[in-house]
Image: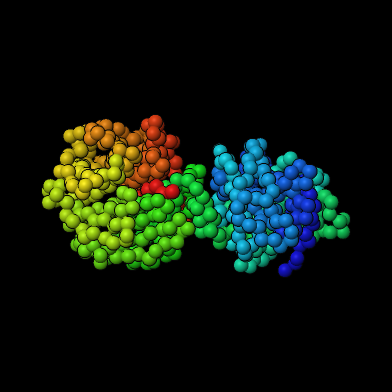
Amino acid sequence: MFAPRPRAMRMTGLIVGATTVTAGLFSGGVAQAVSGPEAAAGQHTATVKLTIGDEANSRGCSGTLIDSYWLATAASCFAGTAGEQVPAGKPALKTIATLTDGKTVEVTELAPRTDRDLVLARLATPAAGIAGVKRATTVPAAGTDLTAAGFGRTKTEWVPSKLHTGTFTTNATDATTLTITGKGTDVLCKGDTGGPLLNAAGELVGINSRSWQGGCLGTDAAETRTGAVSVRTDDLGGWIDQVRSAAAGWKAETVVQAGNTLYQGIRLAGGGWTGFTDVQTTQAGNIGGIRTAAVAGMGSDTHVVALATDGTLRHTIRKADGTWSGFGDIGAVANYLGNITQVSAVSIGNDLHVVVVADGKVFHTMRYANGTWARFGDLAPVAGPINTVTSVATASAGGQLQVTAVSGGKAFHTLRTTAGNWAKWGNVADAAGARGPITSVSMAGTGNDAHLVIATDNGTRQYHAMRKGDGTWERFGDLKDVLGTVTAKSVAAGSVDGELQLAVTTSDNKALHTIRHTDRTWNTTSTVDLQGTSGTLGAISIAGTL
């Protein structure tokens, strides 16, 4: 493989083809840029221009937004000397990102890779209204044409004011890099280092690192080579998502069942979503298939309770650092139940409450803060008998466990006081209004109030009601104006930073998400990007963590 020549120069740049600097060589300030045509208006809007250092001694690079808070760029942009390992944390030099809408935002945090010229950089404030780049999950084959974008030097301009692009052909790949060659006269120049390398679908496959810079303004006339090296990003989805999810702020931990497995993803504080990972394949261990699952947040931990296809109930914990415990068998410690069909879970303090439907009856257990479990108890002796139960939901409100069970298409409500005493079942229709036969139910607590969300009439109608802290109910309100006309397979309500977040899986295999704010307004419902999942969607569950 060729060794592209580093050129340590002060950054001035835009893209005119693609060119990159050798990793780490920035004595006095360096960067490279793409020498090709200007990008059309509205194209590659995730690409940003980076200015590192003060006006008297600055270097320029490019980068690409992963989401509203994080961008990917070359670690060498921040290195003081050749080969220096850039430390995590605040950049040594003040760094300003100029977005494609002209706004400028300071970079406040760096999260570098140690095995390649790559760093994730966090913005002080979100890049509102600019979508992050989609990430490819496969490496491009040799001969594949790719597009590089950046704000580096061109063939004729030292400091371009426009984003430029260039077309490159993939030569070869190894474990961490891609070698590419510019087509025609396209080349990566100073200022393009850190810019994105994109496939035909516009997905990120790499970050530009170094190049020969043949034809770039200021390069020796004898140099004509347009080859370059980019670092691969297609294999870093898990690492990128872990860096993003480890940042401070409330998160909506989400699990969705698809096919016979379970996928976990996170809605971050900034509003973006991570990808979804298969909990069985890569995280907590294969339990032979999963029918349904519930998620509960406890501090920065995410508890997942899954009903395996063999009928056993399993439990695992995802820590804030992204590691998972192996699935444990709840029946072995809390007593085995026959014919479990539904499960719900919620945290109250440091205790995890799990409620299941087994043989049409409702049972409750707890996992205490010390990791031990109580034995399952039948709610009929303490809350009264109800007919065959088909589904169940739980919430924590005012320190109390609230439970809604569906029997005969109707919702019944009970609660467990902080003293451990259970109230008798009450028919929700008597307090919140009658609705059609309920097919899916979920609950979430915000403060002292418990929100109840139901899907009725084979999922074609969705409603929201609230049991207030004083025990009175606000009646069911139609969610059509919030969700639109959809057929819901599963509804999931979760409390995140004091607000209700609602997720729905639909009959057309989509997942929808919205938020009910404390002022009672709702966000515009959006479709969740389920990258990483496969199969027909089923149950969904959502909960908040820090």
Residue 128 relative to residue 495: left or right: right
- The residue at the point 29 percent across, 42 percent down is 397
Residue 358 relative to residue 23: left or right: left
Residue 156 relative to residue 229: left or right: right
Q: Position of residue 67 (x, y in %)?
A: 55, 46
Between 414 and 140, the one nearer to me in the picture: 414
Q: Is residue 43 above or below residue 197?
A: above
Q: Position of residue 320 (x, y in %)?
A: 45, 55
Q: Is residue 309 visible?
A: no
Total marks placed: 0
Q: Position of residue 477 (x, y in %)?
A: 30, 32
Q: Position of residue 131 (x, y in %)?
A: 56, 43
- The residue at the point 20 percent across, 33 percent down is 431
Between 214 and 284, the one nearer to me in the picture: 284
Looking at the rendering, which quadrant does residue 498 occupy?
top left
- The residue at the point 41 percent across, 58 percent down is 318
Residue 331 relative to residue 18: left or right: left
